[in-house]
Amino acid sequence: MLVSGTGTNMAALLYASRLPGAAYEIVLVASNDPQAGALALAEAEGVPTFALSHKGMDRADHDAAMDAAIRESGAEFVALAGYMRILGDEIVGRWAGRMLNIHPSLLPLYTGLETHKRAIEAGDSHGGASVHLVIPELDSGEVLGQVRVAIQPGDTPATLAERVKLAEHQLYPRILSDYVSRGYDADYLYARVAELALALPEAEEKISHGSPGFRTGGKSGKFFAHFSDQHHGVPHISVLAKTSGQDELLDLIERDPDTFYKPAYYGASGWVGIILNRPGCDWDQVAHWLERSWASVAPKRLTKLRDAAAEF
Ligand code: GRF
């Protein structure tokens, strides 16, 4: 987590992480302000901390030092909670899709500062908070979840901020938990595979041996992928794709056993399992394998068209 202030959101995330069955663990709280209250709380709770004042430092150098500390901690995701420094494109790019922030407004309304004042002055019925992915443009990444907070007559920015904080403390742990869990959730993984597979020419879904499969070339067409959810006692949720044969299959597994495995039955005919429920699953690699597998079984009329298009 990156924080600059009192860290009430950090506290909410931390205590949620200590409930039974929590989906995440906080491995580091880092701040650009060595005096931040959040750091003292994290220390008291036994969470490792890192502090480096940004004063007198280049933005890129400061970001790089924070990034190094984050990576050193082994973190897989970064949650910003009141981190009052704008992060440069480099660190944001490195953590793309893995860095979240909480913002005290109903985005896309009121990016930036003084959100409560602006909501009250606009006569809005509600303020609220949003958890969103971080992209280089400030407070503009995909919104993952929001909670609305009614604005009451006589509310000041301070009174509204206080209730919005209560709402934030409910929102952030829930959204963060769901977000970090989805890479291990069969429904989510299946939906991503299906999206990639069905984008290939004349691909359609067809149940095969009780599991979703994807084939191309119509009714008599061949399968190019199978989705496998912990079949035959393996812990993997995976997609099966065709290799050129046993040599390549075994070579892949030897070179990268965290990604590839030999699936029961299918493995014997050269299908490789690409493990999806693992940290840092590489979706470009999955897309590449789906495409390759598709090309190996697709009828000539389809591959010809595709090869011709690729030449442009
Ligand atoms: C929160 O209002 C959050 O929405 C904003 O910064 C504030 C952090 O407060 N990004 P705290 O330090 O978590 O109490």
Image (cartoon, grey):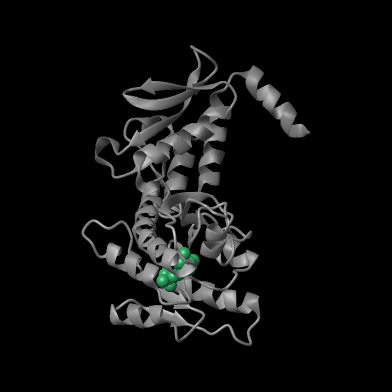
Q: Residue at x 60, y 24 (%)?
A: 201
Q: Where is residue 308 in the image (x, y as percent from the top left)?
A: 74, 27
| Residue nearest the observer in this picture, 148 or 187 | 148
Say which of 189 and 259 sits in front: 189
**Residue 75 seen from this side:** no
Placement of the C terminus among the 4 image quadrants = top right
Image quadrant where one finds the N terminus: bottom left
Residue situated in front as seen by the camera: 233 or 78: 78
Please tell me which residue is depicted at 47% across the width and 32% down the height of the picture: 194
Q: How many marks?
A: 0
Name the quadrant containing residue 59.
Answer: bottom right
Residue at 44% x, 50% y is: 145
Q: Ligand 1, what quadrant?
A: bottom left
Image: 308 above or below 299:
below
The location of residue 173, given as percent across then percent down, is 35, 58
**Side (left or right) of 266 relative to 81:** left
Q: Can residue 119 be seen in this view?
A: yes
Residue drawn at (32%, 23%) of the image: 209
Q: Give the percent coordinates (x, y) of residue 152.
A: 42, 57
